[in-house]
Amino acid sequence: MKIKIKNIRGDSTMAYVKKTGSKWQYTISCTVEGKTALIKKSGFRSKEEAQAEASMHEAQIQEQYGENFIINEVSKPKNISPKKVLNEKEYKQLYDELINNLDNGLGYYVLLLNLTSGIRYSEAVALTFQDFDFNNNTINIYKTLCPAGKILPIRSLSGRRAITIDKIVMSRFKELFKRIESNNKDLIFYYPKNKSKIVSKQVINSLLKDVLLNLNIEPVNTNNLRYTHASILLAKGLPIQFVSARLGHENIDSTTKILQNHSK
């Protein structure tokens, strides 16, 4: 059997190199004695470092197996949809990271609410101090930030709801309220430099991306945290009716359709 090498890209290695989190990974596809295998290794600090070791690894395999070795072209996977929800392990990692970094800014509180309540970014930033009921560990959702930058009542009855929040998260907000400065809009996530006077979604998504990359987790956006929360609840055996009401959907069909789309 002759050694067959395809390298139409002109690289020094046939490996497919990609960034995973803050590190780089290489994948080598090869056929050894008629059997195809994928060899992966991650943890490299740069693309060049990953390519160099991949090339060396290919040479070692080729020397070991000689003519019984075929190296295959490895191209970038096509039509791979971006990640849409976090799994339970990633959820726990992100939860712990947010809890431990709350002193670093209000953005961490926004993300913590998105993750643990399933509310939308627009609902989270519309919250006022009076919306938190610390006696019953609930928050009242009845306002939303509109595209024009105004905070208005939620139109649908299903969107207006009270959501139970875990005691740890509520205790962190109770501590926050003791030291946060008041403002004329009574908003929790008040940011005077913005036209809307609220921490922007772009800033929150950027923060989320940085946090997830530091955890070596493929980034998602704040809307994905909402459906991560829902998928975790369903995995724990909570009924779809409960999850649908928590998300503020009008019916369970909407919830089912959206969650199916996010689980693909």
Image (tube, grey):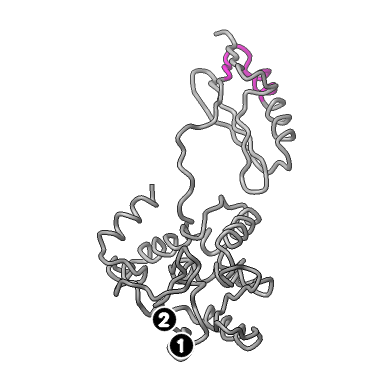
Among the two numbered marks 2 and 1 on one chain, the one whose residue lies closer to the N terminus: 1
Q: Amino acid at mark 1?
A: Asp
The residue under the point 45% across, 42% down is 81
The residue under the point 60% across, 69% down is 108
The residue under the point 58% across, 17% down is 69
Foreground pick, 100 / 63: 100
Magenta-colored span: 58-71
**Magenta stretch encompasses residue 69:** yes
The residue under the point 29% across, 75% down is 157
Residue lying at the far bottom of the rendered structure: 135
- Number of disc labels: 2
Foreground pick, 161 / 126: 126
Tag 2 near tag 1, CB within 8 Å: yes
| In the depicted structure, whether residue 220 falls above or below residue 146 | above
Q: Amino acid at mark 2?
A: Asn
Question: Disc 2 and disc 1: Cα gap in Å?
Answer: 8 Å
| Dominant SS in magenta | helix
Of labels 2 and 1, the one closer to you: 2
Residue ID for mark 2: 140
x and y, in percent, of residue 212 in the image? 60, 56
Q: Quadrant of residue 236?
A: bottom left
Q: Quadrant of residue 252?
A: bottom left
x and y, in percent, of residue 56 in the image? 72, 26
Looking at the image, residue 151 sits to the left or right of residue 64; the answer is: left
Q: Which mark is residue 133?
A: 1
Foreground pick, 199 / 31: 199
Q: Quadrant of residue 42?
A: top right
| In the depicted structure, whether residue 70 falls above or below residue 136 | above
Dot 1, how many residues are within 10 Å of its Cα: few (below 14), some (14-19), or many (20+)? some
**Magenta stretch encompasses residue 63:** yes
